[in-house]
Image (cartoon, helix red, strand yellow):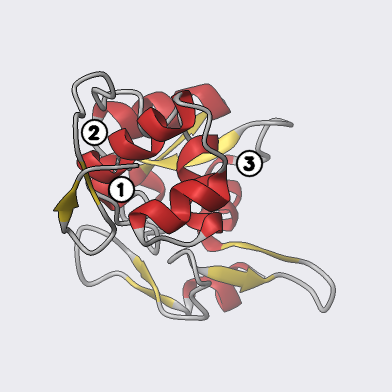
Amino acid sequence: MPERFWQKVDKSGDCWLWTGYINPSGYGQFQETSTLSERAHRTSWKLANGPIPPGMFVCHHCDNPPCVNPAHLFIGTGNDNMADKVAKGRQARGESVGGCSDAVVAAVFRLASEGLGNRRIAKALGMSKNGVAGIRTKRRRAWQFVDVSSTAQGTDARGETHEHP
């Protein structure tokens, strides 16, 4: 198996890039057996360092998902992985989460605090009901930095400013 794995690795740069299948999240995927598939960086870690402790993550120092260079990988908990992401500024925030501006998010929360349901908020802001629900469920994680108290008027999903009902 090691020979078959390393044949699919481009070692020409600092990051050793997986040249086999890349999954939709950007990570290499290695088919170890006919019934076992695993992210390629995890296989690289195991080949270089031995088993991965149960419940642990194989994380990238380089933040390059297709990289399988064992020198760029480290073992960590889920919390370690999240802290690394936040420390490196890779935590999605604001418009990178769902494509909404801070003004739209603030308007959603303000209208919700006034008792409007998702359907009425969506209609008022020119959004889908699911879009409103997505913002409201991510309230404490992705949108916690948005000041929702200072919105006298709102901006709809098209960027048009207007008074809310």
Q: Looking at the picture, tell me which residue is in the foreground, 52 or 88.
A: 88
Query: Within the image, what quadrant is residue 14 found in?
Result: bottom left
Specify whether residue 28 is in view: yes
Side (left or right) of 8 relative to 97: right
Three-letter amino acid code of the residue under disc 2: Lys
Residue lying at 65% horizontally and 37% vertically, measured from the top left: 52
Side (left or right) of 101 relative to 43: left
Marker disc for residue 88: 2
Question: Could you say whether the residue bearing mark 3 is in a helix, strand or loop?
Answer: loop
Question: Could you say whether the residue bearing mark 1 is in a helix, strand or loop?
Answer: loop
Give the quadrant of the C terminus. top left
Residue lying at 30% horizontally and 48% vertically, measured from the top left: 63
Q: Residues within 10 Å of mark 1 (few under 14, many from 20)?
A: some
Side (left or right) of 15 relative to 138: left
**In the rendered view, would you say 139 is above or below 16?**
above
Closer to us: mark 1 or mark 2? 2
Three-letter amino acid code of the residue under disc 3: Gly
Give the Cα separation between the discs numbered 1 and 2: 9 Å
From the image, tell me which residue sits under label 3: 50
Marker disc for residue 63: 1
Specify whether residue 91 is in view: no
If you read the primary sequence from the N terminus, does the residue marked by circle 3 or circle 1 appear first? 3
CB within 8 Å, label 1 to label 2: yes
Pinpoint residue 72: horizontal percent, then vertical percent. 33, 45
